[in-house]
Image: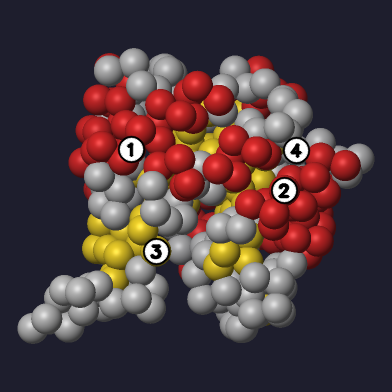
Amino acid sequence: MPLSVNREVFITCAVTGSGGTQDRSPHVPRSPKEIADSAIEAAKAGAAIVHCHVRDPETGAPSRDPALYREVTARIREAETDVVLNLTAGMGGDMVFGSTEAPLPLNDKGTDMIGAAERVVHVAECRPEICTLDCGTMNFAEADYVMTNTPGMLRAMGAMMTEMGVKPEIEAFDTGHLWFAKQLVEEGILAGPALVQLCMGIPWGAPNDLNTFMAMVNNVPADWHWSAFSLGRDQMPYVAAAVLAGGNVRVGLEDNLFLDKGVLATNAQLVDRAAGIIERMGARVIGPDAVREKLGLTKRAPQ
């Protein structure tokens, strides 16, 4: 199989995520100001796209409060450093079952199931250039937690994103997610060429061995744009793997807290490390304007 190295690579920085990492590193941003500042520093280090969740400023717990998203996006837009905004729309599809002998009723702690319109209300208000669409349902590592995105929900959310003029970034955690993403484009719910993020090594989705990775890559239509990432110590090896396979890269504190063994990272440091890998492979890191042209993005003012 010949190499298909991507020579013009964009970096996405996943700034904070929604996992329980806020107490494991002081660098995981919590408040809107901290998230925006970290995103801007990542952009200065070479990230063309910043992928943002929000957190409760006091506890660091994940949140979907539209007011927090409005503050984050306003702060990033007011900065002198340009960057493409990518907001998550993954919140509100969390189902935690009861015990194995009594799975119903659902466990209130951790369950957060809301309608399609409410899941994208912050997207409608903030109008980022990109928002994520988790393209399927998956068992996660946490006991009886299921990330829940039914075909009906995805069709409804995807149609709303398309109507808003916000480009969905399809997050694919397994090959079946890519299959359904292609169905959404075929049905005209999402416009092609689509944008895909291959999420590798997240238990219990696609493992991050290279055979599975290439199976995912080979299922992405040739005219689509894609990035890939993996977790923890495999974050930087996946920078190289994605570029070698013809894709783009994602790094950031959502997926990995460490720069080196025992050395906690900042988002800017992770982006800088990734940019160095890319450039040493003979590729070029491209900026936000080039990404907008490549992906057909339009900067919009918030509503």
Question: As rendered, which of 89 and 66 lies closer to the eye?
Answer: 66
Answer with left or right where residue 64 lies relative to residue 79. Answer: left
The residue closer to the viewer here, 234 or 268, is: 268
Quadrant location, the N terminus: top left
Question: Is residue 241 depicted above or below 179 in this figure?
Answer: below
In front of the other: 139 or 270: 139
Q: Measuring 26% from the left and 57% from the top, which residue is drawn there?
A: 138
Q: Secondary structure at mark 1?
A: helix
Could you say which disc has been placed on residue 83 in the image? 4
Q: Residues within 10 Å of mark 4 (few under 14, many from 20)?
A: many
| Residue for point 15% across, 76% down | 103
Q: Which comes sooner in the sequence, label 2 or label 1? A: 2
Q: Would you place residue 101 above or below residue 127 in this image?
A: below
**Callout 3–callout 2 Cβ contact below 8 Å:** no
Dot 2: few (<14), some (14–19), or many (≥20) neighbours within 10 Å? some
The nearer-to-camera label among 2 and 4 is 2
Q: Is residue 297 visible?
A: yes
Q: Amino acid at mark 3?
A: Asp
Q: Position of residue 225 (x, y in %)?
A: 47, 27
Relative image position of residue 122 (x, y in whole percent): 60, 45
Measured Cα–Cα span from mark 2 to mark 1: 24 Å
Mark 3 sits on what residue? 112
Residue beneath disc 2: 70
**Within-10-Å neighbours for mark 1: few <14, some 14–19, many 20+:** many
Query: Tag 1 or tag 4, which sits nearer the N-term?
Result: 4
Residue at image mark 1:
154
